[in-house]
Amino acid sequence: MGRPKGWATAATGRAAMRSPGRPPVARREHRQRFWETIARGVTSEKAGVEAGVSPAVGTRWFREAGGVSLLPSAIPSGRYLSFAEREEIAICHARGFGVCEIARHLGRSPSTISRELRRNAATRGGTLVYRATTAQWHRDRRSARPKTAKLVTNSFLRQYVQDRLAGVIHTPDGKPVRGPRTRWIGRNKARRTDRCRAHAWSPEQISHRLRLDFPDDESMRISHEAIYQALYIQGRGALQRELVACLRTGRALRVPRARTKRRGPGFITPEVRISARPAEVEDRAVPGHWEGDLIIGLNRSAIGTLVERTTRFTMLLHLPPMAGYGTQPQVKNGPAMAGHGAEAVRDAIATTIVTLPEQLRRTLTWDRGKELARHVELTIDTGIEVYFADPYSPWQRGTNENTNGLLRQYFPKGTDMNRYGRSELDAVAAALNNRPRKTLNWKTPTEALNELLSSAQPSSVATTG
């Protein structure tokens, strides 16, 4: 005859649990160590190993939490029993020590030991057996104290948030605009795919708008962080994870700030940053300093642009797709078949810029794109020093950004750049170089460049046509 119903609750004083399963190997301190490592910018796999679990467990923890740590960073005070003390209690109890003797050994109150042996004992075998891992698991389970999310209990507030996040947009005459069919595949960020047509208010906009729409209803209040957590964390039950596609980033996981700071092209070293660029580049008095970038079009097409800072003389790079693009499978770690990979851009710049006299090949300032990862080879081949602008600082290449805006008259956004051949690019560059500029006192870039070349070496340097 088995134990009567409710005997475990009566013996331990804790509520009955439904299918608790076995205690996990990792404890609360393991998770705390994991999130502390994540905050330093380490990947989830390496953070799992550093926390004492497998890389797969670290990845699962990160994805289940949506990249959001809800554990307090503070270490529990000495008021609470530690795992080491629970191991001592289990050893002493197994040797037959009494409660008072264990309490004297640990320097704790006998009531603390008695309550620990009763409340945190294992009951699966039909008897009360104290194990340190099981006791620590019960402690971690109770300390979590899960609280029902506000979006779960307040259905009107939840509907308001969902409508502002994923509500269907309408035309001025009231017709709904469904947009393209999209499928959320659970990846961190959908790239180069259609986005859903929705209101797409940010959580911060929703949070602050509630105070204007419901000034007297305190129940219609929620922080933007609570909305983010409802989207990112599995098991909250308030908002579906698919709604992250309505966020502007489309990101399904929160990326730690330290990890984003570490991210960046590994080929950019201190000696090639714009801070190391010669001071003579700033005043535009000496020609031969260039700025460059890519103009991106449909189907991963691109055109390269080179602009001389002093004269605004422009040269365009033809970057056609490689043979087999779109018909042959992409080779892992192979060259970029679209035509604007590191090798293609290096060769295009070298082929174009070596047509200029040596005094016009001083420096090149580029965006931080990986298409110029082979800048060292470019410097060796052409003698031009390459520097990279700071992140999110387009004004450091203002001449190039302005020229790219002028080129959009010929190469509009949303068009396939592969439609244009080498001759068409040369024609557009010639048209732009023969257009008067206010900054050049209404001279053309070609005239300004020819004047500089003639004044430097009037007898031996040929002018540009």
Image: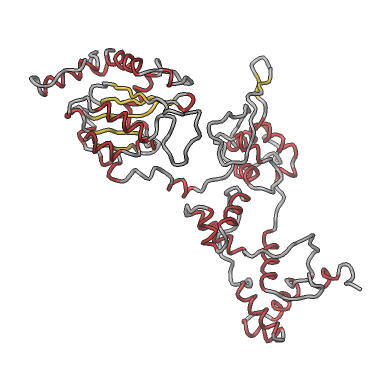
Q: Quadrant of residue 292?
A: top left
Percent coordinates x, y for residue 36 in the rendering: 52, 58
Colour scheme of the rendered structure: secondary structure
Point 56% across, 34% down: residue? 248
Point 79% across, 72% down: residue? 125
Q: Quadrant of residue 7?
A: bottom right
Q: Is residue 450 left or right of residue 306?
A: left
Single out the residue that lies furthest toward the left: 459
Q: Relative to residue 207, is residue 439 depicted above or below?
A: above
Q: Is 438 in front, or is 460?
A: 460
Q: Is 81 in front, or is 288?
A: 288
Percent coordinates x, y for residue 139 in the rendering: 68, 66
Percent coordinates x, y for residue 64 in the rendering: 63, 50
Point 57% across, 62% down: residue? 53
Point 55% across, 39% down: residue? 189
Q: How many tags in the picture?
A: 0
Q: Relative to residue 203, is residue 464 depicted above or below?
A: above
Q: Relative to residue 262, is residue 74 depicted above or below?
A: below
Percent coordinates x, y for residue 391 in the rendering: 39, 38
Q: Relative to residue 372, is residue 53 depicted above or below?
A: below
Q: Quadrant of residue 464?
A: top left
Which quarter of the rendering shows the C terminus?
A: top left
Which quarter of the rendering shows the N terminus?
A: bottom right
Q: Is residue 432 left or right of residue 11?
A: left
Q: Is 325 in front, or is 59?
A: 325
Q: Is residue 272 left or right of residue 33?
A: left
